[in-house]
Amino acid sequence: MEDYTKHVVDERKFDQPGSSLGHSSDFTLQKSTGEVVEGADAAWKAVLEIYAPFSIFVHDPSFVINWETENGWTMVGVASLWWSLAAPPSGGESKVKGHGGEEWDGVTPAAFIFEHVKDDSDIKLARTEIYIGKHASPAAYLEREVTRTIRRFECGHGQDAQARHVEARTVDGLSAFVKHLEVKQLSVSSSKFVSSMLPHRT
């Protein structure tokens, strides 16, 4: 699992199909929300969605326990997830110095459950459960993006009509994204935050 975490997940090999990265064909992912995604390639894309807000991240494990099961092995791990957001800073944000002596946008606790199975002469990852604290959720990414957008919008009074139209469309897009969050029930806190930040236009 150390090789998988360091050289597959942390190195962001999301451009490769999950079926080629040591997952079983029926690999299953369970997210922190309880949503379950089945199938190696589909579940691997769902893993990408979890880590998509980050430009860089690394898992720093602090506890691991492993035991043998009827069909293979189960492992439970706890780690600190160090991350920096892909969205540019909106200003006035502080960094956290930590893993590797580097500065990060944040760190949050995370827990994982991995189920491995014997597959002929090989070992495959059959199931992963990921539990990441809310501070590393897309809410942080949304906060940065929305703050930048709202600041541009509020300063748009002196812009020409075309520029104001672009900003208005951006805000409309964020409004639509809020509805998407609510419908999918991906993050109630994220949708409420975005809603509270959106300008009320007449």
Image (spheres, grey):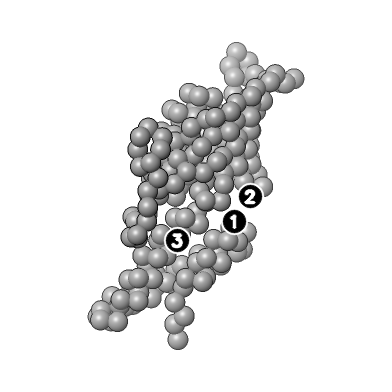
Identify the amino acid type marked 3.
Glu
Q: Is residue 35 left or right of residue 47?
A: right
Identify the amino acid type marked 2.
Thr
Picture quadrant where residue 201 is located? bottom left
Name the mark nearer the viewer: 3 or 1.
3
Q: Which labelled disc corresponds to residue 4?
A: none
Q: Quadrant of the N terminus?
A: top right
Q: CA distance from mark 1 to mark 2?
A: 7 Å
Residues at circles 1 and 2 in contact by the CB criterion of under 8 Å: yes
Element type at mark 1:
loop
Query: Mark 2 — residue?
Result: 33
Q: Nearer the viewer, residue 12 or 21?
A: 12
Q: Which labelled disc corresponds to residue 143?
A: 3
Query: Mark 1 — residue?
Result: 186
Q: Earlier in the sequence, mark 3 or mark 1?
A: 3
Q: Is residue 151 left or right of residue 73?
A: left
Element type at mark 3:
helix
Point 65% across, 22% down: residue: 66
Furthest residue in direction right, as rendered: 70
Residue 86 location (% of width, % of height): 38, 50
